[in-house]
Image: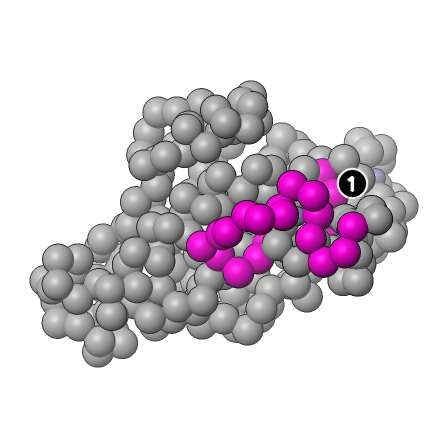
């Protein structure tokens, strides 16, 4: 499986960005002094704050990854819930630094910050055979000029040596999830994601598991077979993670995990 995404985007990330944003911290906006701060575009103080704010393994809900308060194993909102994926884990609560990091990666368009985000997320990535990014809305990608989650996955692939592939595509339309309530979110993502048939077929061909042209009608269910970690920026209701997992499970993926930068 040689398919790798985002690597080119990571390696060619912007000289222009360096010139325009390189001197300001992408989180707090304060000036960066000295080259030691510059690789991630985030000052030392903010970097330390991010490291200190990480959710510890002991206090995570076993399903959604939120911090447990007085509950055991599962948070109250995950009781009795069945998911297609095994679990989500995130280094941050959205309200405790997750929002700052995501803003640094997305809104401030500081692609270099995503390298630090990958460093913080990497310890939570399970030993899977493939990483799959949740595709962003095409409008948002066009506006930014890059897809932050795709770049994040590119960094993780370089760092962990786990192949990645854009197995999912997102149909256009739908609203940004953050504007919606719980039920509207599930409705908004229903049928929104589909398999990237070309990518799947190429993978199957490369791995010798399927002859070209067989996908998806006859061989998909048995053929993909690999364990997958789906990567996204924020986990809120789990609607997007569940929808993406269902698509991959229907195509015969093995164990599915979800990893996000923040859980809200
Ligand atoms: Zn800062
Ligand atoms: Zn939970």
Q: Is residue 82 magenta?
A: yes
Which residue: 66% across, 58% down? Answer: 62
Residue extent of the magenta highlight: 71-94
Asked if one can make out residue 195 in the rendered structure from this viewpoint, the answer is yes
For label 1, the SS is loop
Residue 163 appears in the picture as rendered: no
Q: Which residue is mark 1?
A: 97
**Mark 1 burial class by Cα count in 10 Å: few <14, some 14-19, many 20+:** many
The residue most toward the left is: 213
Relative to 198, say whether 32 is above or below: above
Q: Nearer the viewer, residue 113 or 243?
A: 243
- The foreground one among 137 and 43 is 137
**In the rendered image, which quarter contains the N terminus?**
bottom left
Q: Is residue 206 above or below residue 156?
A: below
Horizontally, residue 81 falls left or right of residue 252, namely: right
Q: What is the x, y in percent for residue 28?
A: 82, 34
């Amino acid at each position: 499986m040689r398919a790798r995404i985002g690597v080119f985007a990571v390696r060619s990330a912007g000289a222009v960005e360096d010139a325009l944003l390189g001197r300001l911290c992408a989180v707090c906006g304060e000036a960066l002094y000295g080259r030691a701060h510059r690789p991630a575009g985030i000052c030392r103080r903010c970097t330390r704050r991010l490291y200190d704010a990480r959710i510890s393994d002991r206090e995570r809900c076993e399903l959604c990854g939120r911090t447990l308060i007085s509950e055991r194993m599962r948070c109250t909102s995950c009781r009795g819930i069945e998911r297609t994926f095994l679990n989500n884990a995130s280094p941050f609560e959205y309200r405790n630094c997750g929002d700052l990091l995501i803003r640094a990666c997305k809104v401030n368009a500081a692609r270099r910050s995503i390298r630090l985000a990958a460093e913080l997320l990497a310890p939570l990535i399970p030993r899977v055979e493939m990483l799959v990014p949740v595709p962003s809305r095409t409008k948002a990608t066009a506006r930014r000029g890059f897809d932050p989650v795709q770049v994040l996955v590119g960094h993780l692939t370089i760092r962990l040596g786990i192949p990645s592939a854009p197995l999912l595509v997102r149909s256009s339309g739908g609203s940004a999830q953050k504007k919606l309530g719980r039920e509207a979110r599930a409705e908004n993502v229903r049928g929104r994601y589909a398999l990237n048939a070309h990518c799947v077929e190429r993978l199957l061909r490369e791995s010798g598991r399927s002859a070209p042209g067989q996908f998806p009608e006859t061989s998909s269910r048995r053929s993909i077979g690999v364990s997958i970690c789906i990567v996204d920026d924020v986990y809120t209701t789990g609607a997007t993670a569940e929808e993406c997992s269902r698509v991959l499970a229907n195509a015969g993926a093995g164990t599915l995990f979800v990893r996000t930068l923040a859980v809200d």
